[in-house]
Every structure is written in C-alpha cells, then in structure tokens.
Image (spheres, helix red, strand yellow):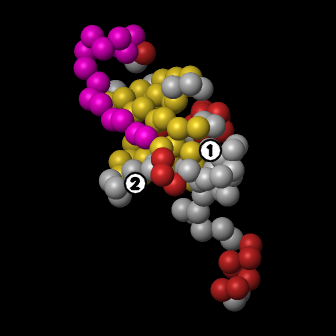
C-alpha cells in the first residue's frame, strides 16, 4: 500500500481532531492517559487508577488519582469530559492561551495543575 493511500485513510495517532486541538482520541477503552504540557513535560497515568472526575464548565476538569490531582482548565471541555469518562482520551495537549483558535466551539485546555494528593485534602473518601 502506498504512503499516499495510507495518509488518505489512516490518521496518525497523535493528531488531534480539528475541533478538539487539545484532545487526541484513541479507539475503544485505553489503558493509559497522557497529559502533555506546552513545555513538553509529559505524564502518563493508568486509567485503572483514576478514582474520580469532576467537571465544572466554569472551572474545568479535575482528575483524582491515588497520589495526585490533575486540574485542567480551558474552554469547551464538555467533549473532553465525555471522552475521559469513556476512557477514550489517549493524550490531553495543553495549549497556551496565546494560541487560542478562532473557532468558538473548539475544545482547548490552556492550563494544567498537578498537585500531590495528601490525606485530609477532602478527597480521601473517593478511593
């Protein structure tokens, strides 16, 4: 099969959807979730250890793992939340605010905060 034919029918795995520049989807339930920051720093966590997902449209998405809490902020994150619930997100790309697209309905994560989870932080009952 020629390379041109492959490019026509097979999309590279790390290519986000045009309307979801911060979201790289996978096929079916995935085993790991990667969060790749604009600086190039990246962390990969197993979906099996994801204990809780909170979505507040005005605040963002909070992912609670046994050892850390990841907070993702941005715009139009409802598709990201739905895909995370389905374990269909392979990579979340954090794109700096300066690169916001002109498309008003684009899914865009522009900030990521990772903090160590500590006993007594209000998230202990989620295990």
Locate residue 58: give its quadrant: top right
Q: Nearer the viewer, residue 93 or 10?
A: 93
Q: Secondary structure at mark 2?
A: loop
Other residues around mark 1 within 10 Å, as few (<14) / some (14–19) / many (≥20)? many
Identify the residue shown where x is 60% and y is 57%: 16
Query: Magenta includes 123?
Result: yes
Image x and y of residue 59, in percent: 51, 25
- Residue 4 visible to the viewer: yes
Q: Is residue 67 above or below residue 6?
A: above
What residue did someone put label 1 on? Answer: 107
Question: Which residue corresponds to the image point at 29% horizontal and 24% vertical from the top-left?
Answer: 117
What residue is shown with label 2?
A: 38
Quadrant where the N terminus is found in the figure = bottom right
Q: Position of residue 95 (x, y in %)?
A: 48, 51
Q: In the rendering, at what x and y percent does residue 38 appear?
A: 40, 54
Q: Quadrant of the C terminus?
A: top left
Residue drawn at point x = 35 percent, y = 58 percent? 40
Magenta-colored span: 111-125
Residues at discs 1 and 2 in contact (Cβ within 8 Å): no
Instruction: Classify 10 Å Cα crowding around label 2: few (below 14), some (14-19), many (20 and above).
Output: some
Q: Is residue 25 visible?
A: no
- Residue 122's mark? none
Q: Residue 106 or 71: which is nearer the viewer?
A: 106
Q: Earlier in the sequence, mark 1 or mark 2?
A: 2
Please give left or right for residue 85 compared with residue 49 in the image. right
62 displayed left or right of 114: right
Q: Secondary structure at mark 1?
A: loop
Cα distance between the residues tagged 1 and 2: 16 Å
| As drawn, 66 above or below 27 | above
Q: Residue at x 36, y 35 (%)?
A: 113
Percent x, y of residue 14: 54, 62
């Amino acid at each position: 099969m020629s390379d041109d034919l492959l490019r026509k029918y097979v999309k590279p795995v790390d290519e986000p959807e045009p309307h979801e520049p911060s979201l790289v989807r996978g096929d079916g339930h995935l085993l790991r979730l990667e969060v790749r920051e604009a600086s190039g720093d990246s962390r990969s966590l197993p979906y099996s250890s994801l204990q809780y997902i909170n979505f507040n449209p005005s605040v963002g998405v909070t992912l609670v793992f046994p050892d850390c809490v990841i907070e993702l902020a941005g715009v139009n994150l409802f598709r990201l939340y739905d895909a995370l619930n389905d374990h269909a997100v392979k990579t979340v790309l954090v794109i700096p605010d300066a690169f916001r697209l002109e498309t008003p309905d684009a899914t865009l994560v522009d900030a990521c905060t990772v903090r160590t989870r500590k006993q007594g932080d209000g998230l202990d009952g989620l295990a």
